[in-house]
Image (cartoon, rainbow, N blue to C red):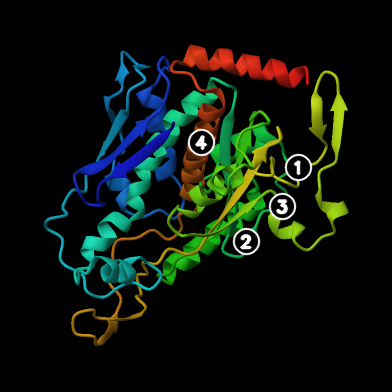
Amino acid sequence: MLRYLTAGESHGKGMVAILEGIPAGLRVFEEKINLELGRRKWGYGRGKRMEIEEDKVEILSGVRKGITLGSPISLLIQNKDYRIEELPSLVCPRPGHADLVGALKYNTRDIRNVLERASARETVARVTVGAVCKLLLWEFKIEIISHVIQIGKIKIENKDLGFEKIKNLAEKSPLRCIDKSAERKMLAEIDKAREKKDTLGGVFEVIVKGVPPGLGSFMQYDLRLDGRLAQAIMAIPSVKAVEIGEGLINSGLLGSQVHDRIYYEKKRGFYRKTNHAGGLEGGITNGEPIIIRGYMKPISTLMIPLDSVNVVTKEAEKAAVERSDICVVPAGGVIGEAVSAFEIARCLREKLGGDSLSEMKRNYQAYMHILKNF
């Protein structure tokens, strides 16, 4: 019911997204989408490309007078750094990138043909899709934020500050970090990596508040919302592991220490005092905040390149060097918000149906009435 495609190359004319399944009657603000694109660009450790690109969206279809029509929404972000035809061929793949496997798969000895599409530049299109989905979720009082919990080996000490405080602190930090002490150490680590012409990875956390119980399904493997979210986060470039709730810690504990006990109050209905599960049980939302973490490896373009092999001559050479960032974990969190927004909006559309926003809201109110009187 809700789906999207993206198209475009890193140094092509632009990035395009087509989003289908948004109901008619949703107010869409270009400035809201541009705000999300700006958040993606922001962050200490980003490279020169972010200084070049304006990243402003142009809505080409599906919206009239600021209101969705129910038809596919097409979104364009033009690239200022448009020079794909002028760029030289590359023949030395970068370890850790899609360069070599892509060249083998698509039978090309010009790695430029691979990296232009495999580039993380494509995520601007995903962020525009997520921005529209966030607007839809906001109509149902569902909100999504992210923050950085680790850069390199530096971790934050305390993240249990509450949704609003985390949101406010993250938006004021150049690293989207809510721990000032850890932030200072993280900034220093990024500076050290820059001096060494190296890169740094880390961990971001996405938090979703206001999701009602009952989204997702255990009926088939591909309907489980935790699986959908994990796939969406894992598909972000450089992400190599995904955690939902306290998955890593829980794997070493007893069941009595892990599972969230269930309580009931007439006004609140069913609830839990803990959220070790991260808001999902059996592939279905349980009404608690959804907590997802993405673990990002250091990006693969190094200014001091690693050993590689020329795919034409088969001789040993150093890997290709492209303009690069030092650390992209804060941006990873923003992209994580976007792809999570899409997956949750997709499940919400499946649950509620409706061709218009007003119909969708009526169905939502009926569903909430059922939950309240269960």
User: Does the residue at mark 3 contact the one at mark 4 (Cβ under 8 Å)?
Assistant: no
Residue 220 seen in render: yes
Q: Residues within 10 Å of mark 4 (few under 14, many from 20)?
A: many
Q: CA distance from mark 2 to mark 4?
A: 28 Å
Residue annotated with mark 4 = 341
134 left or right of 37 in image: right
206 left or right of 108 in image: right
Q: Which mark is residue 246?
A: 3
User: Does the residue at mark 1 contact the one at mark 2 (Cβ under 8 Å)?
Assistant: no
Residue annotated with mark 1 = 275
Locate the N terminus and report the quarter of the image it occupies: top left
Q: CA distance from mark 3 to mark 4?
A: 21 Å
Residue 363 position within the rendered picture, expressed as x and y whole percent measured from the top left: 58, 16
Identified by mark 3, the residue type is Glu
**N-terminal-most mark, 2 or 3:** 2
Identified by mark 4, the residue type is Ala
Q: Residue at x 46, y 30 (%)?
A: 133
- The quarter of the displayed image where residue 161 is located: top right
How many discs appear? 4
Q: Indicate the secondary structure of the residue bearing disc 3.
A: loop
